[in-house]
């Protein structure tokens, strides 16, 4: 088979490409079609782990990722057993892709919406920003130091063959490939080195939708300007315009849609109302109070919003728990009144720790902990809570930690990337409800954390509450874990809050229902007609 390709382009970043792509994946999957997502290049520090070839066992019954927020699979090793090489060839993705592969979170969720197993081909190139002018390059799920050091424009020549091959392979195996673009296709300074927008569209002869955020203003100018800047052969691929995040009476838009069609020959095929609480994790930005559930606030959780925050999408389930209020903390004032302070993952731990100190947030976290307030560190946040960061290989940077846990982290060249399921031991303090709870999630980290030897010799030892992955201070109020996706496990949510969050299945169906109710009749079917 050769799949029909439907592509979602945007006039800007944040126009709504990711959620619309997710909704299309679920819509076409509900038609009984074999569907997968694709995004040639994603720039995001939100990444997920996909299954690899050396899994010792298949996921157990009940651990289907489509019914949960994370895979919930059994533990996977970070690579082939010593002395062996990963197999190649075959039709099973586990026989082709390296263990511990990374893809962008958006494509991970889109694959689940499509009822497909996440696969590195769905996001062959992932850029993880480490600084304003530098990103770690992940090609086909694995970090490439050579590509990371290569100039931006020179990189496209080297990666396009693998991107095209990944897309072609997906097209050969499926009925529909739903492709997401990046930013805008009309960035004329980047058009010559494009590997994610119109080059992909032309390669796949994709039927393209162009979506714009009408809430920002200037939507019709954005749509027309984007279309007008494209060459004629690329303009011909645009099948419809989509107005997203509209507030008000849609009848007041006339006569602009007809005038735009007269200018371009492209119809406006959908006007999508503003929808804050769709339940899908935000891919590129942080949430705000407008997305919080209504009701009395029983607990406030402040998440430190440092510049290189990673995997922020794992906190989405907390937004859906009744009575919880999440605050992004950028100043000490944002932590006032918080019941918990969470230090999340970081793509550049030492740099984010320096930022934390510059804002005075280190003192705010220390004061909160000294008063018995709950503090949680996840991955990079765990590392920051320790005594020191040691970087012999120049991966992240050396720095003294906050000293809230008697731990030390050493950065290794080898990145740990794997699914993990483990059982908490006995905990005390505010984290006591987690005692004995089994939690599933994933690890993505260079750092390896151990007890601080000198402090341990003096009897100051952190309690290891999750084997090799989690430690608690003696007072019981400070907890650090390497396990991402903790709140995506319903067992953890129930233990901590006595609550459940909507499953992904509910979210995906809601997205598809919403989209279907606002598209012009027949448009979605016409997009996949031969």
Image (spheres, rainbow, N blue to C red):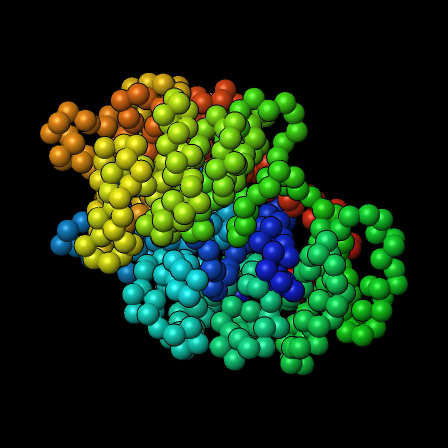
Residue 396: give x, y in percent of width and height. 29, 54
- Residue 359 image point, x, y percent: 44, 45
Q: Quick check: 117 left or right of 77?
A: right
Between 145 and 369, which is closer to the camera in this rendering?
Answer: 369
Count of all numbered marks drawn on residues in the image: 0
Q: Is residue 497 above or below residue 12?
A: above
The residue depicted at 39 percent of the width and 29 percent of the height is 367
Let me know if residue 419 appears in the view. no
Q: Nearer the viewer, residue 471 or 139?
A: 471
Q: In the image, what residue occupies the spot 26% across and 44% down?
A: 400
Residue 339 at x, y percent in the picture? 48, 25
Using residue 211 as the reference point, say whether residue 164 is left or right of it.
left
441 over 169 or under it: above or below: above
* Foreground of the two, 152 or 234: 152
Where residue 334 sits: x, y (%)? 52, 36
Q: Quadrant of the C terminus?
A: bottom right
Q: Is residue 234 visible?
A: yes
Q: Write down the quadrant of residue 468 in the picture.
A: top left
In the rendered image, the vertical position of residue 367 relative to residue 84, given as above or below: above
Q: Nearer the viewer, residue 522 or 314?
A: 314
Q: Quadrant of residue 405?
A: top left
Q: Residue at x 63, y 54 (%)?
A: 16
**Which image quadrant for residue 495?**
top left
């Amino acid at each position: 088979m050769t799949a029909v390709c439907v592509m979602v382009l945007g006039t800007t970043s944040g126009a709504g490409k990711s959620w619309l792509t997710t909704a299309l994946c679920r819509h076409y999957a509900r038609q009984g079609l074999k569907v997968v997502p694709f995004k040639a290049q994603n720039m995001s520090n939100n990444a997920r782990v996909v299954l690899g070839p050396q899994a010792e066992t298949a996921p157990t019954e009940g651990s289907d990722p489509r019914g949960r927020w994370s895979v919930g699979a059994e533990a996977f090793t970070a690579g082939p057993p010593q002395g062996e090489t990963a197999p190649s060839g075959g039709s099973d993705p586990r026989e082709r892709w390296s263990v511990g592969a990374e893809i962008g979170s958006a494509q991970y969720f889109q694959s689940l919406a499509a009822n497909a197993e996440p696969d590195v081909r769905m996001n062959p190139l992932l850029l993880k920003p480490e600084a304003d002018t530098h990103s770690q390059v992940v090609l086909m799920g694995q970090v490439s130091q050579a590509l990371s050091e290569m100039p931006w424009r020179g990189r496209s020549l080297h990666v396009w063959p693998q991107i095209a091959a990944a897309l072609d392979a997906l097209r050969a195996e499926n009925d529909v490939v739903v492709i997401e673009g990046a930013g805008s296709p009309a960035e004329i300074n980047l058009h010559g080195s494009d590997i994610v927008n119109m080059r992909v569209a032309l390669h796949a002869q994709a039927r393209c939708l162009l979506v714009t955020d009408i809430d920002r203003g200037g939507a019709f100018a954005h749509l027309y300007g984007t279309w007008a800047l494209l060459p004629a052969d690329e303009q011909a691929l645009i099948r419809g315009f989509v107005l997203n995040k509209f507030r008000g009476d849609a009848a007041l838009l006339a006569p602009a849609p007809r005038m735009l069609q007269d200018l371009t020959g492209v119809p406006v095929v959908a006007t999508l109302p503003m929808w804050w609480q769709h339940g899908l994790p935000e891919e590129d930005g942080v949430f705000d109070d407008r997305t919080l559930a209504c009701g009395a606030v029983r607990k406030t959780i402040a998440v430190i919003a440092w510049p290189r925050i990673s995997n922020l999408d794992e906190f989405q389930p907390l937004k859906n728990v009744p009575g919880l209020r999440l605050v992004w903390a950028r100043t000490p004032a944002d932590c006032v009144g918080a019941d918990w302070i969470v230090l999340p993952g970081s793509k550049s731990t030492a740099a984010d720790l320096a930022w934390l100190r510059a804002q005075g947030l280190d003192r705010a976290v220390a004061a909160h902990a000294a008063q018995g307030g709950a503090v949680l560190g996840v991955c990079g946040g765990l590392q920051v809570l320790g005594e020191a960061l040691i970087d012999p290989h120049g991966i992240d940077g050396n720095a003294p930690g906050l000293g809230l846990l008697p731990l030390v982290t050493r950065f290794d060249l080898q990145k740990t990337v794997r699914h993990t399921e483990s059982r908490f031991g006995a905990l005390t303090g505010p984290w006591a409800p987690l005692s004995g709870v089994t939690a599933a999630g994933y690890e993505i980290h260079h750092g390896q954390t151990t007890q601080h030897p000198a402090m341990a010799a003096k009897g100051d030892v952190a309690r290891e509450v999750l084997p090799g992955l989690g430690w608690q201070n003696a007072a019981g109020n400070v907890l650090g874990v390497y396990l991402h996706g903790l709140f995506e496990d319903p067992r953890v949510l129930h233990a901590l809050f006595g609550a459940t969050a909507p499953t992904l299945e509910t979210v995906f169906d809601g997205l598809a229902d919403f989209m279907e109710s606002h598209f012009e009749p027949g448009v979605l079917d016409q997009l996949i007609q031969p």
